[in-house]
Amino acid sequence: MKIIAKIYTDFPEKFGIPRQSGLIEELEGRIVFEKEYRNKDAVRGLEDFSHIWLLWEFSKAVRDGWSATVRPPLLGGNTRMGVFATRSPFRPNSIGLSCLKLKRIEYTEEDGPVIYVSGVDMMSGTPVYDIKPYLPYADCRPDATGGFTDELPKRELAVNMPEELLEKVSKDKREALLKVLATDPRPSYQNSPERLYGMSFAGYEVGFTVDKDILTVENIEIIESNID
């Protein structure tokens, strides 16, 4: 398969990325085609759809070999499930699937058509294999069940961020950052209240601790971003 594009987001590293697409609408990204595919005719009509499917590569999770079972973080990292019953990145083929909201398509002289999306769950620079329109009449299944995920508690942290730290973050990134933190970026098996976690987001390094259901932001520093 050929890489047709790359998506650029606010996440230069894996830590902190939402576990599924569409969970945080404020997280935006832009899809830039590879030179061979920078043809406006290739996206003709796409702007009429509200959402798209993205097929992409878990580029930082490529392995030799595979395991029939994995430990989903949502189950605490101790329970094994069949790899095909999960969305784990560690698969025979490291392919991801995301449903994203299509915000707009901009046509540029240098990059051709650039697709802007929201609800992203990918690291910046992630290779994209295909783009398909989301079809409500075929893709929406109101009676669908979610297997073992239906039994998981819906947990959200209260975020305590001092005003002086929040002001360090650009206004257009604040809401997205707060929502990312509220979803608890930590692996489920890490729960030490003394541990200081660090997350890179939108050109900032965010340090935080978590005690029970309260996440406290301890520091925010501007970093040299590698986000394109």
Image (cartoon, rainbow, N blue to C red):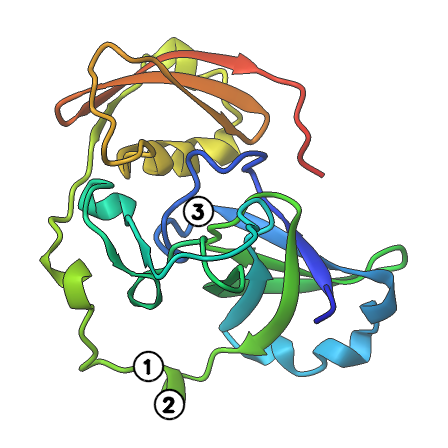
Say which of 141 and 152 sits in front. 152
Task: Indicate which disc, 3 or 1, sits on the residue closer to the N terminus.
Answer: 3
Residue pointed to by mark 3? 26
Question: How many other residues sit within 10 Å of disc 3, few (<14), some (14-19) or many (≥20)?
Answer: some
Residue at the spot 63% in from the left edge and 71% down from the top edge: 130
**Which of 186/169 is in front?**
186
| Quadrant including the C terminus | top right
> Dot 2: few (<14), some (14–19), or many (≥20) neighbours within 10 Å?
few
| Numbered disc 1: secondary structure | loop
Q: Nearer the viewer, mark 2 or mark 3?
A: 2
* Vertical relation: 221 (above or below) 200: above
Q: Disc 1 residue type? A: Cys
**Which residue is drawn at the image coordinates 80% and 74% (left, top)?**
40
Residue 103: name its quadrant. Answer: bottom right
* Image point (48%, 78%), residue name: 134
- Measuring from the top left, give residue 154's x and y in whole percent: 15, 48
Residue 83: horizontal and vertical position, in percent?
Answer: 34, 62
Front position in the image: 208 or 161: 208
Identified by mark 2, the residue type is Tyr
Per the image, the residue denoted by label 1 is: 140
